[in-house]
Image (cartoon, helix red, strand yellow):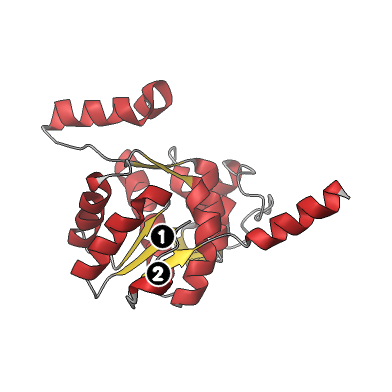
């Protein structure tokens, strides 16, 4: 399975999972290794328990994935060691010092720590990160009822914050926000948050006036 995405993309991975494990997966969210490192850096890094063997292994597997991290080697091991994006991604990729089961556990620890840190962020700071986070994520959710269904799936899975990134997703996110007032819904490129009057629905958009200013400067 670990090779399928590289060979045939997420579609082949989904096909293999469905055929071999009798599943019905249709939707996916794809984040590259570079994206994982960048997201962790945007969160301010992660605090993880690191053994000395893991410290040495992750330093050997360190790659310059995030422009925010640099290639600084991890200098300490122990409980709740602070890792930047490149270090945390290298930690999740360790494969030679133990078993594949332990490797999977490390990957879960990274994802869980990132989700917990995101959940602890103030909403205004989280919204400010949306424009930087969403370009790092690729999905196959079309601009239709599937968006609403995907939002429901995330709510059912226990998510308390749901993001959407396509302009055509907005009406379906609003529909979900009305149905689940205790869940926060954030939509990038949308325009209706200020008119809907929902306390749990938010828009994030680039500061377009800045781009227009630069275009004017360039044009003379």
> Is the residue under label 2 in contact with that under label 1 (CB below 8 Å)?
yes
- Where's residue 59, x and y in %? 59, 47
- Where's residue 195, x and y in %? 38, 72
Say whether disc 1 or disc 2 marks the residue closer to the N-terminus: 1
The answer to which of 89 and 28 lies nearer the viewer is 28
Question: Residue 87: in sight, yes or no?
Answer: no
Relative to 37, 153 lies left or right: left
Relative to 43, 157 lies left or right: left
The answer to which of 124 and 215 lies nearer the viewer is 215
Q: Is residue 158 above or below residue 220?
A: below
Q: At numbered mark 1, what does the secondary structure look like: helix, strand or loop?
A: strand
Q: State the separation of the CA atoms marked 1 and 2.
A: 9 Å
- Where's residue 1, x and y in %? 30, 29
The disc label shown at residue 193, or none:
2
Q: Is residue 134 above or below residue 197?
A: above
Residue found at x 40% / y 69%:
193
Quadrant housing residue 61: top right
The answer to which of 209 and 27 lies nearer the viewer is 209
């Amino acid at each position: 399975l670990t090779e399928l995405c590289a060979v045939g993309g997420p579609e082949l991975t989904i096909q293999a999972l469905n055929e071999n494990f009798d599943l019905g997966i249709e939707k996916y969210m794809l984040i590259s290794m570079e994206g994982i490192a960048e997201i962790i850096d945007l969160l301010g890094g992660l605090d993880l328990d690191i053994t000395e063997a893991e410290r040495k292994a992750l330093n050997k597997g360190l790659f310059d994935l995030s422009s925010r991290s640099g290639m600084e080697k991890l200098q300490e091991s122990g409980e709740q060691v602070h890792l930047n994006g490149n270090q945390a991604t290298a930690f999740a990729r360790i494969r030679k010092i133990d078993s594949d089961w332990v490797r999977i556990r490390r990957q879960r620890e990274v994802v869980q720590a990132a989700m917990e840190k995101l959940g602890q962020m103030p909403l205004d700071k989280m919204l400010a990160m949306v424009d930087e986070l969403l370009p790092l994520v690729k999905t196959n959710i079309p601009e239709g009822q599937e968006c609403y269904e995907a939002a429901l799936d995330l709510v059912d899975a226990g998510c308390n914050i749901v993001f959407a990134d396509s302009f055509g997703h907005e009406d379906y996110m609003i529909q979900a926000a009305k149905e689940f007032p205790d869940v926060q819904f954030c939509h990038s490129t949308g325009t209706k948050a200020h008119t809907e009057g929902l306390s749990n629905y938010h828009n994030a958009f680039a500061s377009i006036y800045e781009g227009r200013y630069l275009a004017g400067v360039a044009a003379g």
